[in-house]
Amino acid sequence: MRRNRRGSQGMQKVLFLVDDVTRFGGVRTRVTEELSCLSGSNDISPMVVSRCNSRNLMAIPSALGSISMDVGYPIRGFAYPKMPHGGKAFAYEISFLINFIASVLMMIPVVCFGRFSLIYGHNNEAGLTAVALSKAFGIPCIVDLHGVEVDEYLEKHPRWKATSCRIRFWRRIEREILVNADCVVTVSRPHSLEVGVRGGSPDRTVVVPCFADETRFKYDPLTRARTRATLGFAETDTVYVYSGILPAVYDDCHPVHLFSRLISSEHDRLLLLAPDQESLTRARTHVSPDMASRCVVLQVPRSEVPQYLSAADVAILLRRPTVVNRVASPTKFAEYLLCGLPVLISEGIGDSSDLVRSNGVGEVLPNVIGDDAILHVRMRVNELVGEHARSGARVVAEDALSRRRWRVAFLEMLASVSGIEVCPEADRRAKRP
């Protein structure tokens, strides 16, 4: 393991290279939770550098300010624009190379004068920049892979031809990161195994799932009663909830479609929480007129999500059976359980499905949901709704997916790679992963 240039004493300055943090989503949530782990540590000083589209450049200061409020301390950083690809396949590869070269050149003076002890890159694009700077300056680097990004590219752009040339290009980028990073962070055990198949080393691979702040995401009975009254839910209603962007295709993996099949009485209700206006519009189009009286659709900022989750009884988390979802670690899963919600979850979502099955905090649904499965789920929902199930879900989440559970593990990972010992006093006795 390479040691940083400053030895093992003094302040550890960490350079975080990330994608666009102006919008709420997987990248921003993941970065926020990681930075939150540094709160209260006098050993680490982070700087966040975000690559974004030029139209979002002016919004970066407010985004960093918002993240600072979330994590509890001021975040230093800046942003620079990236070249867009316009949704064109060949332009995507070209823009990647141009953006990579521009990123490295731009970051050279920052690294020269910043005296960083560690470079922490997110995903392939920022991760490859982190690896290049690491090699050039002899600074250790960590690359945090949020999933199997190459497969996600192709899944998002089904019209792009998966030519052998294109696949070889992206696999080569992927392998450069897996082979040369001092540490590769994955989000689940299946993801870690997939990384090993693609060229990563088990000795340099660490699993850090997407977790959430247990002090914010929690069940509050008073908030529950007030919110249900505001939304028009009776205490006898069974409220299903889905938080996030709805799938574009209305099929078995769509939460509204599943709810329509689970309805068994007039007391069944559905609460859809959309993160932005686009998601809100999509959600409303997916609610048919005959279900409108049962559904409440709201645009809710992440800071207000916990109060609405407290008002619900059971959460829905459905994904298609793809390699992208097989290795995933959805942040909303942690948020659901921390708020005491049992989860109806698809089979084969990272470690999440197994966690539900092994701890009885919900029901794992088959990828093809037949009528017999629907009947079984209806009966399970009756068993899952109540204070006992709610408290059980919270206990499991605190043990497996809370910030308190993962803070020390995250800090120790930074310390092991950078060579500087970090000892947060309050967390010395926390469990290792």
Image (cartoon, grey):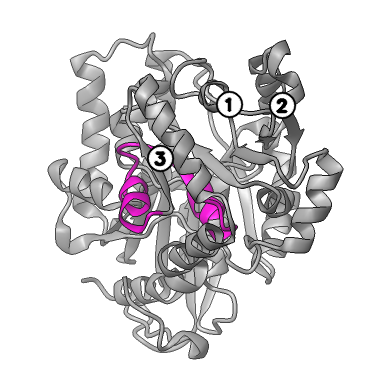
What's the residue at 36%, 76% (across, down)?
A: 412
In the rendered view, tell whether residue 44 sits above or below residue 314: below
The stretch of residues the image draws in magenta is 331-360
* Residue 180 picture location, percent across and down: 22, 53
Quarter of the picture holding the N terminus: bottom left
Tally of numbered tags = 3
Residues packed near mark 1 inside 10 Å, few (<14), some (14 to 19) or many (20 plus): some
Residue type at tag 2: Arg
Circle 2 sits on which residue? 294
Residue 337 is inside the magenta segment: yes
- State which tag comes first along the sequence, 1 or 3: 3
Reading the chain from its start, which is encountered first: label 2 or label 1? 1
Q: Nearer the viewer, residue 418 or 24?
A: 24
**Where on the picture, by quarter, is residue 45?**
bottom right
Give the structural element (helix, strand or loop) at label 2.
helix
Give the spatial CA distance, label 2 vs label 1.
Answer: 10 Å
The residue sitting at 41% across, 17% down in the picture is: 157
For residue 263, the mark is 1
Residue tagged by mark 3? Answer: 125
Element assignment for label 3: helix
Single out the mark in the foreground, 1 or 3. Answer: 1
Residue 295 among those drawn in magenta? no
Front disc: 2 or 3: 2
Residues at circles 2 and 1 in contact by the CB criterion of under 8 Å:
yes
In the rendered image, the vertical position of residue 271 relative to residue 415, given as above or below? above
| Element assignment for label 1 | loop
- Could you tell me if residue 237 is visible in this image? yes
The residue under the point 40% across, 64% down is 400
